[in-house]
Amino acid sequence: MTRVLLIEDDPAVRRGVSMALRRRGHEVEAVGTGEDGLAALAASAPEIVLLDLMLPGISGLEVCRRIRELGQVPLVILSARGDDVDVVVGLEAGADDYVVKPAGGEVIAARMRAVLRRVAPSPPGAAAREEHAAFGDLEIDRAALRVTKGGRQLALAPSELKLLLFLTAFPERTFSRRELLEQVWEHSYYGDARLVDACVMRLRAKTEDDPRNPRYVQTVRGFGYRFGPL
């Protein structure tokens, strides 16, 4: 059972999504405004947040930014706004995934599972060489899911952490956006490649001294992304 906080202003959608998730065994707290959502986040410590963008009062984007300032709880945007600009803006605000409404309960639950797997601890028996790694002043503790830079722990959202863990497991190997979608986001639809690009941008902002000239997560033009060479 997963504790879910749903922030959605449409009563019908709020009811429908809540019922669909409860039927799948999840515990759902549903609220109708961003203000109520932030209060519920502080009071109930949900394991994942489902957030609509078009909210009365505080906008969904502002709620997303505030949630990211408070911590790194997994966050999925549910929105009827599916234009590329809207999706990219939502992802750049810190969302781990973006689902365009209307979406069935099974789709939403599947996206939730994929996001939550990104913050799951490493399985027992993982190779010792994979547990700790250092790349310059960037250090990765895979077992503890902790990343530090210059001795300071970085606050990475689940998708940012999973992407970094995946790329650093294969230094200097180039992966296409499609491969990263399948391995990190567990998506097969290439149209969601914007998830990858937005996550890379956020990850560079946190790990690079100069995000415009990345040392770690590098672009291989015409192919995709790689970690290094350093």
Image (spheres, rainbow, N blue to C red):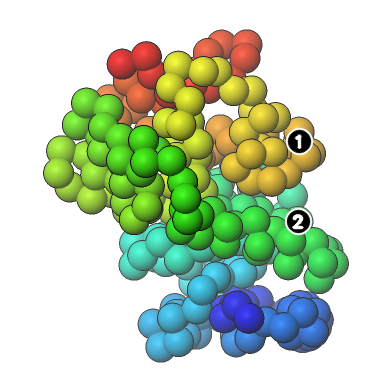
Picture residue at 56% right of the left edge, 70% below the top = 49
Quadrant of the image containing the N terminus: bottom right
Where on the picture, by quarter, is residue 183? top right
User: Mark 1 — residue?
Assistant: 191
Outermost residue, front direction?
125
**Label annotation for residue 100:** 2
Residue 41: horizontal and vertical position, in percent?
45, 80
Out of 213 and 55, give the one closest to the viewer. Answer: 213
Image side of residue 97 versus residue 108, left or right? left
Q: Amino acid at mark 1?
A: Gly
Residue 34: horizontal and vertical position, in percent?
51, 76
Q: Counting other residues with Cα less than 10 Å from the Cα at mark 2, is it few (<14), some (14-19), or many (20 or more)?
A: some
Secondary structure beneath dot 1 equals helix
Q: Is residue 197 at all visible to an observer of this figure? A: yes
Out of 71 and 47, give the one closest to the viewer. Answer: 47
Vertically, is 39 above or below 171?
below
Where on the picture, by quarter, is residue 88? top right
